[in-house]
Each structure stands twice: as C-alpha cells, then as structure tokens.
Image (cartoon, rainbow, N blue to C red):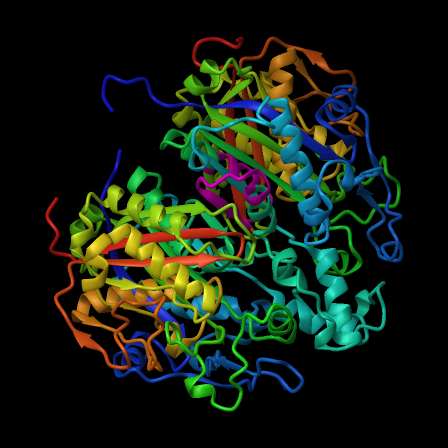
Amino acid sequence: MSRRVAVTGIGVVAPGGTGVTRFWDLLSQGRTATRRISLFDPAGLRSQIAAECDFDPAAHGLDPTTVERCDRYVQFALVAAREAVQHAGLDMTRENPWRTGVSLGTAVGGTTRLEQDYVLVSERGARWDVDARKAGPALERAFSPSTLASAVAEEFGAHGPVQTVSTGCTSGLDAVGYAHQAVADGRVDVCIAGASDSPISPITMACFDAIKATSPNNDDPAHASRPFDAHRNGFVMGEGAAVLVLEELEHARARGAQVLCEIAGYATFGNAHHMTGLTKDGLEMARAIETALDEARLDPTVIDYVNAHGSGTKQNDRHETAAVKRALGEHAYKTPMSSIKSMVGHSLGAIGSIELVACVLALTHQVVPPTANYETPDPECDLDYVPREARERRLRGVLSVGSGFGGFQSAVVLTGPERKA
Amino acid sequence: MSGREPRRAVVTGIGAVTPHGIGTEVFWKTTVGGGSSLAALDRGGCEGYPLRVAGQVRGFDPAALVEETFLVQTDRFTHFAMAAARLALEDALLADADFDSPYSVGVVTAAGSGGGEFGQRELQNLWGQGSKYVGPYQSIAWFYAASTGQISIRHGFKGPCGVVASDEAGGLDALAQAARTVRHGTDTVVVGAAEAPLAPYSIVCQLGYPELSRATRPDHAYRPFTSEACGFAPAEGGAVLVLEEERAARARGAEVRATVAGHGATFTGASRWAESRDGLAHAIDIALGEAGCRPEDVDVVYADALGVPEADRAEAGALADALGPHARRVPVTAPKTGTGRAYCAAPVLDVTAAVLGLQHGLIPPTPHVTDPCHDLDLVTGPARAVEARTALVLSRGLMGCNAALVLRKGGARGPHR
C-alpha cells in the first residue's frame, strides 16, 4: 500500500521571529538573524555568535508548569505544533486518536537544561560524585529525549505511534520522512511531524569549537554565515523548531482541508566514511536524492528548487554541490539552490524541518528564498546559489537535502498541490 | 509486486552484552536458568544515591571487541553497541562478508540516555577548567546517534540508517523500523539498542522517575506482578540483531531463527499507567493483525513487567482485553527481573530471549518472583518446555509509549535451514 501524503499545516519558531509569517518575511527579504550570543556569556569561546530566538513562552500561551517541566526545545516544539495544527484546521475531537501519530526529531535534546543542572549538582565541575539534592525539578524529562514527542502527543491527545528521532543534523528531515512513510504505509492517517533543538549552550558551543566547525567571525555576526561563498569558514549555531501536519491526501480532502503541498519521496543513506568528515564526491547524498525522486516517480527536471543543507563549512558546501550535480546532471546548473542557514543559522536537528517549512512556503508563494551573504564565488561551488535576493519562479518540485554527523545523508522531495496522480 | 512472494524480515544473528556477561551464550544460559545479575550498585562515584540496586555489566573489556580508534571517540553505550553488533555479525556469519552493495546493509539503533559518562567528563572539563579543555570527540560521543554512525562506519554499511531516541518502547520501534526497511527493499539491517545509564550524573537524572526502585536488597528490588512490587531496577548493556530478507538469507545458507512478523505502537501519556492498559491492548491488536495471527496463536508473552502495581495491573488487563480468555492460559514471563531494565535495550533483550526461546523450545522464568498476584500464568521457578511457534513481546516507556512485537519461529517455510 502506498498512499499520497499531503501537508495541511505548518508552524515554526525560528530566529528572527516566531510564527510562519515572520519567518517568511525574514527569508523573502534576505535578512539575517545571526548575532553575538546573549543566552549566556560567550567570552572565551572561539565562536561567540549564533542565531537566537527571541522567545517568550508566556507570550505564546505556555503556562508556568509547562515551562518548568519542559526544556526550551520542548517549548519551541509545543508552540510550533500549535501553530501547525491550527493552520491545518485539525480538530482532534473529530479525529481517531489511535490513527494520529507524532514523529519529532532532535539532535541534542535536553542538553541545555542538563548542563544548567550539572553546574549546580557538580559545584561548577568540582566533583564527579555530583550532589543529587541540588538538582532542579523534572530533570528526568531533560534526560529523556522521548519527552519531546511525548509532550506534543499529550498536548493534542494523539494515541498513535509516537517517536523521537535523533539522527544528528538530519533528524529534521528523517522525522518528517518517517512520518511520510507511516502515512504512506497506512499505519496512521495524520502525523504531527517536525523537529526542535535549543543547542546554544556552553557545552555545545565548546564541543563545536573543539573541532573548528563553527564560524569565528565574531566581529561581524550578521554576515558570519556564508554558505557557498569562497570566504565561508564554518556554520553559525542556531535554534528553533518547525512542525508540519502530514495527512493522507484523501483524508485531507474529505475534511475539506487546504492541501499546501505533498511529500512525494524520502530517502536516507549512511556514507560509512567518517563521523564528521565528508567525501568530495557526494556519492551517498546523490543516491539519497535519486532514491527519493524514484519514490516520488519524478524526473529530476521537475525539480525547480533545491533547498540546500548549505551549512557554510568548507567541506559541506563542496560535498553537497558535487552530490546535487551527480544526481540532477545538467539540470543542476539550471536549478536555483539556496541555503537559509545564511539567515537563521544551523539549529542542528531542528533545521531539516525548518527548511522543509521554507520549502512549503516557497511552493506556496512560488518564490525561492536567497542565500544571504553570498558574494565571492568558489570554483568548487559552481551552481546558482540565489545570491542575497529572493526570486520569483515557477516551482513544481522542490528538493531538500541534509547531511549530518554520523555520515547520514537524507533527501525529501515535495510537489505542489496541483500534481495529478 | 502482485504475484510475488512478500519480503519478510528474519533474524539470522544475535549479539548481546548484558549484566549476565559478554556474549549471547552466557545471556541465554543465565536467563534460561533463572539466574539474576542484579546487585548492589558499586561503580565509582555511583554509591551514594538512593538507587542501590542495578544490573551492571562486569568484566567487559571493550578493547577485545572494538578497535582503539573507535573506543577513544565513544561512550560506554556505544562500546556496548559496537561490541554487540560485531557479535551479531559473527553469529550471522557475516563478519567478513563481501556484500553485493554497501547500500544493501542498513543500521538502526535505539538510545534513550546517550553518552552520559563521556558527557559528564567533558562537562567537568568545561566547567572545572575551561572551554579549551573540551575534547574533539564530545560532539560525536554524547549524542544519541553515535552508535548507529559508528557501526555504519566501522563495517562500511551505507544503507538506510536510523536512530530512535524514544523511551523503552523505542527498542521495539527500532526493530519494527528495521523490519520495514527490509520489506521495502534493503537486504540486511543491523538493529538493536544499548544503554549505559550508570554514571553519577545520569543516575541523578533518573532519581526523578517515580517508578525507579529504591530497594536495597537485590532480590527485592524488582518484583513485578507481586504485592511487593516497588518499581524497577535499571541496567546497562544491550543487544543487536541481524535482520535479513528471508530469501536472501536462505540463498546464502544462513540459519533463519525467527521472523519479525508484526508490530504495533501507541501512546497513552507519561506515567499514566492505568491508561496504558488501553494503549497496550491496541498495540497488541495492531501487531497481531500485521502478523496475521489470532490471539490464541500466541504461545508465550514476554511482558513489560514494570514492577509498579498500577502498571502491572494495567498490563494484565491489556492482555485480557487483547487476548480474551487465552490471556489466562498463555505463559507469561519477564526474564528482565534478572538483568534489570536497560531502557531502550530492555525490550531488545526480551526479543533476544524470545528468539532463543523459540529456537530451544523453552520459556525462561521470571527471577525473584514467586507469588504473582494477577490472573496470569507467570512462569516462575524453572524454565518451561513449550514447543512455541509465536511469541509476543511487550514494552512500555516512562514517557508514555507502548509497543508490541510478534515473532514467529523460523521463516515462512519452516524453522530450519
């Protein structure tokens, strides 16, 4: 059984403003939301910049108990999920809860809260046998990444399969990919899918410092994230969440829901090469793209926009360019490919879903978001990266790709709502 | 695909690193003998907490099974996973196999607690000494995806890779994901779970679980389905299985142990144990439906057996709801009372025991339990000889997930080669 999978609602918490409207304003205007870190004092770090969310949980309707029980990344997910479910017009009292699932991704889960409490129980790293009495409430919920999907499922009364996915930086694509498979296979009719991460914390910034993966452009944070540019020097950390309501196409039509687009194909492979290193040829990512297109039964020439992983590290952007050329052939040179990480940073596990929401919006508006800060071409990156300004374009199929630690390479294909069977 | 035989996912290899010891054989011998490895928690720095009893993996020399280059980059939970994966591949006679294509082998693991010991050490370096003292491997050792990534890299497997970071039930979800991956076209998937939650800060985090047993005697700490039930004892360790497409497995002469025939997953809310009755019953219905089994086909149940009275009652009720009168007749067992619950790995150890039990015609008993107080045929005392064909494995997680997995002995064309 393979059923068609519609997207009927989207929600987002991203740097530059909460909610889909403000997110699209930022992207379509090519503005950047990267700045010096304010969530903690970053003095002493190699990379002191990030794309932060100005997020006030109370203003978004989260009560004090929820705020105390839920880490920042779970709060993001709850707010994004509410927006998506409302957008979809999904009335859970009319849905079969056993046929409604949740699939959410996160790369580092509750590490922000885990670190905050660690500082207390260890007396700032003074002791190995930490003092349990100094721990804050609900610490076990930060310890268990399952909290993410569990909290969202409880919010909406979903009783179907509920899963937290954690494949590092491809989590946001994989969580939606799994949801797509669950709907296509007939295991659920509706799936609340997406991802969230809040990794702007001393330990996570320090661990990327240690491998020089993040940009040290501390003097000019607004222009620090430079995907595909010859002067790129690492990614800029981000945070946020995005949620998509996935639904069997006939189920969506039967309840009169607006179909924003379809998720038509998904694939993931490992490169079995290195936990953090990438090959130059992009062979495995190319295979993920080809397999996702096969599943979607689409010719590569139907892809009118590639939403890149485009992290802004030397190796990633080169690797990805090679992969897209390998998979799309000559068509790659005619297809715009941009990275929104230039504007909202790289929020690890969350970004894949944030990028999928950007793809849905690109299809809806028939506009390709730009790569901000792109100025100087790199001979190894010779595609059309949509420098600095958004572009109107007829979009039929859109491809989003991701690449992450562990060697994982994922691809998702989306098509506009007018596609015939 | 009409006219073609459907693809089935069968178990052809098992590797286990558990509190019972290193390797599948010692796990099975101890399990079937009703032995227990629960003991006083005595790892350095872990002694002073109100968690006194756990299942520790002792005598584990990771260097005997995993190369040094991988060991320095990884936490203990990944050491367990990599060691178990190697044992499973050896067991399947695939350790040095030349696969047709690296893309035909995938890896799926479940992990619910991450690289806690490694992470705590690096947190100590950061907060005790400064950010420049955080090592280069923190970024790849602490996160939940470490085991899948390292197994893929070590063995050169480029097929679909997945990581389930759910609660306990995620162990069964990972197996189901692997089985679907095989059905959808990947020939082989290495799948399992391993956890290492017995480091000081990880223990402090777990103290918030109201279900955690605080008993001080190893023989009293984890006694599900009894009137003395007082929670569960946690454990470390894990197991990895090799799943293969049945025809491909037979073509290379592999031993087909069992088929992963059905899976169901539901959610009924964190620590809402009374509601888990409905959730677990639904999961069983879905799993049996997918396997094409009737309730009375179930020959043995490996229970979740949380050890919390309300949860135990809900599980007995779920079996009655889903299996009807057969629930009072079918043997039920919970060998995990002898190892403790290794979070996501707990149901994978149960699957390991279930596959071996089907193979040997034996149902291992439930250590430490003598006088169950529910209307179940709980296997206590010695192992029971039963020529079972179908096993049902149940799992519930502390964050509210419920899962059921149906295993059938051998493959479609009988159990043997």
Is residue A59 something that shows in the picture? Answer: yes
Question: From the viewer's perspective, is residue B349 above or below residue B195?
Answer: above
Which quadrant holds the N terminus of chain B?
top left
Specify whether A191 is left or right of A295.
right
Asked if the magenta segment contains residue B173, the reply would be yes
Viewer-proximal residue, A293 or A193?
A293
For residue B304, say whether it is visible. no
A8 on left or right of B183: left
Which residue is painted at 39% across and 27% down in the image?
Answer: B290
Residue B272 colored in magenta in the image:
no
Where does the image place residue A110, in percent across and percent down from the top left? 59, 64
Q: Quadrant of residue B248?
A: top left
Q: In the depicted view, which residue is nearer to us: A259 or A49?
A: A49
Above or below, A338 against B360 in this view is below
Q: Is residue B220 above or below residue B351?
A: below
The residue shown at (44%, 63%) is A316
Residue A43 in percent (x, y) is at 65, 87
Q: Residue at x 11, y 55 (%)?
A: A418
The percent position of residue B244, horizontal first and vertical second, equals 48, 25
Q: Is residue B280 left or right of residue B58?
A: left
Task: Please name whichever residue, B45 or A163, is drawn nearer the observer in this view of the structure.
Answer: B45
What range is drawn magenta here?
B152-177
Residue B255: quadrant of the picture? top right
Above or below, comparing residue B1 to residue B273 in the picture: above
